[in-house]
């Protein structure tokens, strides 16, 4: 039996047929000319026909799509017939350019023009570039880029998924995700957990699996098997039953002996918050405020921010909502705030540090959060990302007090913050561990790179020790401050047990993970969680840490987690 091994990032056992995601369309050679046997008139006719075919295909797909995916497909279909785009390409064909090169250059010009217009029009520039790739693919007679269209459910295999791809991902048709690239904190991994799809990333060689091949995917073990046997088919059938029982969370997280561990949700806006509340989340452990700022050429107004935040607060009356202030920079650049020319953005001006270069934005955001909090019953806490020193923590706490916000905190995602947590927590009321970035910085490993996936896991003993140090600083004499985890580590039921054993007070995760984490925690007494934390800390590697803990939690295998 042919098999592949990667990193399991979202549990589940699925048997299904593979559909490979088409490769990205390559740029036509610069200066490519019309073939000697082709006239400009014929090339223009072929181009127009290709554009119409793309438009028709997108319109057909939009009929059955919903939500954001439907909007994306409809907007892209309109752009495929844009007169400016086609006329520009025909003009270039008449100068001797090939149809592929002409549409490529014409689209580049239109996209630049839209980007320079700013606002809504700037957002349409990505539609133009998507259309360009689709038309070139049509001209070449190869599959269009993006999530493949299908009438039957399938297992999607790809190099990796870009954020734009997920807008057209239909979880009713996509049974599981498998990628040859990416890592445990890549966009693919985060989306898979949010959608509840079994997923394996960094699985080298899966790009060679032929379309239509039947495979068994184990999202917990990180394995893919071609032509599954009877035992694997039975395991997939058993998972379907288990998944149904894990879909309900009682609304109270605790260990087997009654030690309370509030299970909170990570959300990106009011719609997410409403769903999380319906799923039983005991509050919000991470409100990503970037949703208000992304795709904007200018800072949102105070009223716009207040409305957005209030929608989240209203979903959790009487419960804790932890707001992370703007985490701009690195993979979340903002035209009005960050410098796109930074040579190393992950180590540059991001998060709290943007106040160094663009003072006023953070102050106005804190004012908006305070205003929104005044009109709700939520218990609003606020934390700053990318805090590195006690001085920065004290400064942020003072800014919060000035704005009228009573519970300031910090993100611990820079190793220096973990190492000096005792002094940092002397100035603020709580800390939240961002395990995605903490792992990336501790291991000097870009979390998006598949080849570094083995390094980029929170099971690394070095990362676990940083978490242990953070907790130790939080309970040092004079502190007694709560520490939560809001990184993706909290959504791993086995790692959640270790985190509780290390002394973490709350866990925040995608709402879909709440029930599974709660179910596993409920089988483990606190003393046993503490023993398993010691087992993980003593392991010589991340793999050993994970394997040793999982071996002592048979409930994981029983549940398929």
Image: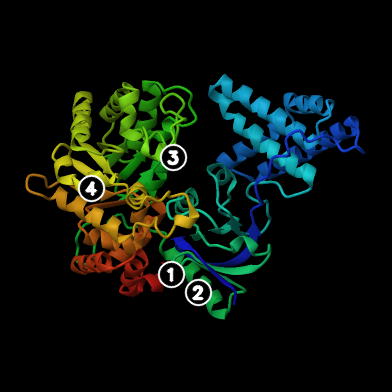
Dot in front, 3 or 1? 1
- Evaluate if marks 4 and 1 touch, with contact meaning CB atoms under 8 Å apart: no
- Label 2 element class: helix
Q: CA distance from mark 3 to mark 4?
A: 33 Å
Q: Which mark is residue 418?
A: 4
- Evaluate if marks 3 and 2 touch, with contact meaning CB atoms under 8 Å apart: no
- Label 1 element class: loop
Q: CA distance from mark 1 to mark 2?
A: 8 Å
Q: Earlier in the sequence, mark 2 or mark 4?
A: 2
Assess disc 3: are there few (<14), some (14-19) or many (≥20) residues with their C-alpha within 10 Å of its C-alpha: few
Asked which quadrant contains residue 172, the reply is bottom right
- Label 4 element class: helix
Q: Nearer the viewer, residue 373 or 75?
A: 75
Q: Earlier in the sequence, mark 3 or mark 4?
A: 3
Dot in front, 4 or 1? 4
Q: Earlier in the sequence, mark 1 or mark 2?
A: 2
Residue located farthest toward the bottom when viewing the structure as drawn: 230
Q: Earlier in the sequence, mark 4 or mark 1?
A: 4
- Evaluate if marks 1 and 2 touch, with contact meaning CB atoms under 8 Å apart: yes
Residue pointed to by mark 3: 271
- Label 3 element class: helix
Residue 4, position in %: x, y?
A: 54, 68
Q: CA distance from mark 3 to mark 1?
A: 30 Å
Q: CA distance from mark 4 to mark 1?
A: 33 Å
Q: In the displayed structure, would residue 253 be above or below residue 167?
A: below
Q: Nearer the viewer, residue 419 or 267?
A: 419
Residue pointed to by mark 1: 560
């Amino acid at each position: 039996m042919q098999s592949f091994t990667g990193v399991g990032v979202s549990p589940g056992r699925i048997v299904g047929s593979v559909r490979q995601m088409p490769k990205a369309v390559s740029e036509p050679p610069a200066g490519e000319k019309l073939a000697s046997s082709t006239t400009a008139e014929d090339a223009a006719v072929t181009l127009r026909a290709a554009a119409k075919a793309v438009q028709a295909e997108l319109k057909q797909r939009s009929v059955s799509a919903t939500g954001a995916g439907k909007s994306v497909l409809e907007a892209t279909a309109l752009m495929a017939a844009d007169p400016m785009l086609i006329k520009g390409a025909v003009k270039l064909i008449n100068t001797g350019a090939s149809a592929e090169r002409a549409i490529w250059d014409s689209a580049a010009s239109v996209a630049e023009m839209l980007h320079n217009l700013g606002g809504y029009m700037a957002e349409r520039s990505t539609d133009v570039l998507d259309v360009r790739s689709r038309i070139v693919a049509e001209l070449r007679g190869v599959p269009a880029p993006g999530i493949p269209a299908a009438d039957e459910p399938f297992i999607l295999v790809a190099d990796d998924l870009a954020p734009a791809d997920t807008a057209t991902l239909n979880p009713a048709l996509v049974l599981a995700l498998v990628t040859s690239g990416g890592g445990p904190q890549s966009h693919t991994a985060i989306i898979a957990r949010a959608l509840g799809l079994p997923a394996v990333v960094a699985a080298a060689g899966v790009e060679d699996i032929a379309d239509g091949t039947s495979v068994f995917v184990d999202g917990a073990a990180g394995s893919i098997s071609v032509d599954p046997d009877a035992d694997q088919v039975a395991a997939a059938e058993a998972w379907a039953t288990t998944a149904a029982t894990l879909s309900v969370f009682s609304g109270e997280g605790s260990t087997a002996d009654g030690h309370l561990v509030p299970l909170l949700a990570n959300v990106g806006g009011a719609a997410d918050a409403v769903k999380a509340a319906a799923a039983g989340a005991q509050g919000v452990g991470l409100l990503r405020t970037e949703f208000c700022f992304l795709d904007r050429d200018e800072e949102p107004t105070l009223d716009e921010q207040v409305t957005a935040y209030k929608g989240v607060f209203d979903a959790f009356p009487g419960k804790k909502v932890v707001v992370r202030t703007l985490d701009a920079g690195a993979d979340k650049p903002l035209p009005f705030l960050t410098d796109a020319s930074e040579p190393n953005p992950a180590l540059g001006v991001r998060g709290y540090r943007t106040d160094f270069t663009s003072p006023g934005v953070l102050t106005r955001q804190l004012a908006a959060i305070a205003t929104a909090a005044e009109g709700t019953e939520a218990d609003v806490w606020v934390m700053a990302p990318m805090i590195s020193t006690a001085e920065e923590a004290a400064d942020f706490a003072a800014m919060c007090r000035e704005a009228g916000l009573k519970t300031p905190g910090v993100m611990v995602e820079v190793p220096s913050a973990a190492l000096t947590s005792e002094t940092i927590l002397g100035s603020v009321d709580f800390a939240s561990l961002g395990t995605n970035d903490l792992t990336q910085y501790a291991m000097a490993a870009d979390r998006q790179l598949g080849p570094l996936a083995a390094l980029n896991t929170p099971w690394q003993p070095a990362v676990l020790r940083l978490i242990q140090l953070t907790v130790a600083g939080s309970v040092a004499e004079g502190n007694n401050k709560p520490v939560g985890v809001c990184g993706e580590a909290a959504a791993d039921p086995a790692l959640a047990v270790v985190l509780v054993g290390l002394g973490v007070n709350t866990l925040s995760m995608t709402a879909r993970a709440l029930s599974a984490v709660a179910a596993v925690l409920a089988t483990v007494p606190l003393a046993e969680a503490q023993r398993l934390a010691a087992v993980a800390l003593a392991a010589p590697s991340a793999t050993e840490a994970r394997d040793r803990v999982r071996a002592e939690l048979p409930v994981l295998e029983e549940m398929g987690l």
